[in-house]
């Protein structure tokens, strides 16, 4: 796993030997599971990506259908890009929740397009197929740790990583330690109330940040404004009921006033959440 990597400049006497990790010493697989996509990467010992692929999750897709494609591509490319596939030492999975981290299970799959994702044992799925240890973490927590290890300078000891898509998730590092709490809490940041008595949230409460900042929330806000009589270039080309988040983003880039308005409103509410997190945790980096 270790290799000689040159000599230090001598200041008198024999120069010291520099040792470093051998990039081919071992390999790992990283998996990111979201509500709509599975992102897979093979990395060498220096965490450099050797192969990256995305596998969309469509409404009709069951876990068996999606993961059969994932494993077929993964095993094929392990054999192709890895010097010795036997040096695969483990799989790290960052997943949306809620999760049972002890058992390695995805629990309530209400935000997935297909209910068959309910109570899915992710750890067993990968251990049975690849025969290596599998570590599972909340997706945002895993992303926060990656940012901390790979990209943040040594004088940074606290950060918050936000992931906003179908939901609002956050990973927190404070005092050089990943904040995990008791159980799966990364999604709880999306249910901090920023507008008391505001928009209904699927959790049963009103005014949660997820009801204002996520992609589905932005689409709902756009449709609400259209029903109130506002105009947009999008509805000229398609029915308001068929408008998707990508349509709103594309139209905003072309200076569509309503699309800019709903995106700016979502950004404002996200800013409120960040301001509250800053006041409570005082992170060095977001």
Image (cartoon, rainbow, N blue to C red):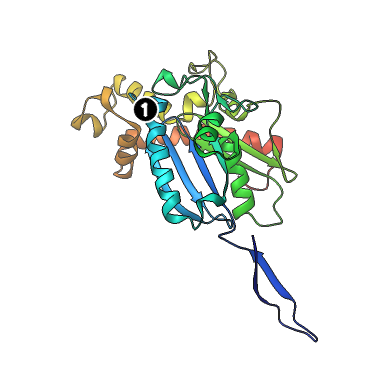
When asked about the image quadrant of residue 250, the answer is: top left
Residue placed under numbered mark 1 in the picture: 219
Helix or strand or loop: what does disc 1 sit on? helix
Along the line of sight, the residue nearer the viewer: 85 or 46: 85
Asked whether the viewer can see residue 262, the reply is: no
Does residue 246 lie above or below 105 as drawn? below
Is residue 28 found left or right of 61 in the rendered image? right
At x 70%, y 34%, the residue is 280
At x 23%, y 29%, the residue is 235
When asked about the image quadrant of residue 277, the answer is: top right
In the current view of this chain or complex, which residue is farthest to the left? Answer: 237
When asked about the image quadrant of residue 7, the answer is: bottom right
Along the line of sight, the residue nearer the viewer: 143 or 6: 6
Q: Position of residue 163 (x, y in %)?
A: 52, 37
Number of numbered discs on residues: 1
Does residue 245 lie above or below 254 as drawn? above
């Amino acid at each position: 796993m270790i290799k000689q990597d040159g000599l230090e400049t001598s200041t008198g006497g024999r120069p010291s030997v520099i040792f470093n990790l051998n990039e081919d010493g071992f390999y790992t697989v990283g998996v990111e599971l979201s509500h709509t996509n599975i992102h897979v990467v093979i990395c060498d010992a220096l965490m450099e990506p050797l192969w990256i692929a995305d596998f969309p999750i469509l409404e009709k897709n069951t876990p068996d259908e999606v993961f059969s494609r994932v494993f077929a591509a993964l095993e094929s490319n392990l054999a192709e890009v890895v010097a010795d596939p036997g040096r695969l030492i483990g799989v790290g999975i960052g997943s949306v929740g809620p999760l049972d981290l002890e058992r390695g299970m995805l629990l309530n799959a209400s935000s997935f397009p297909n209910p068959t994702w309910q109570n899915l044992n992710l750890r067993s799925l990968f251990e049975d197929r690849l025969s290596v240890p599998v570590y599972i973490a909340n997706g945002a927590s895993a992303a926060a740790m990656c940012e901390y290890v790979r990209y943040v300078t040594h004088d940074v000891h606290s950060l918050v990583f936000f992931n906003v898509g179908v939901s609002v998730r956050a990973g927190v590092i404070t005092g050089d330690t990943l904040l995990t709490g008791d159980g799966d809490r990364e999604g709880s940041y999306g249910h901090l109330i920023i507008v008391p008595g505001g928009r209904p949230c699927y959790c049963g409460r009103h005014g949660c940040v997820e009801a204002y900042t996520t992609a589905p929330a932005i689409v709902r806000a756009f449709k609400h404004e259209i029903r109130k009589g506002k105009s947009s270039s999008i509805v000229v080309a398609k029915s308001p009921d068929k408008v998707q988040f990508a349509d709103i983003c594309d139209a905003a880039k072309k200076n569509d006033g309503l699309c800019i308005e709903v995106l700016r409103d979502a950004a404002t509410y996200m800013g409120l959440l960040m301001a509250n997190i800053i006041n409570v945790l005082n992170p060095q980096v977001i």
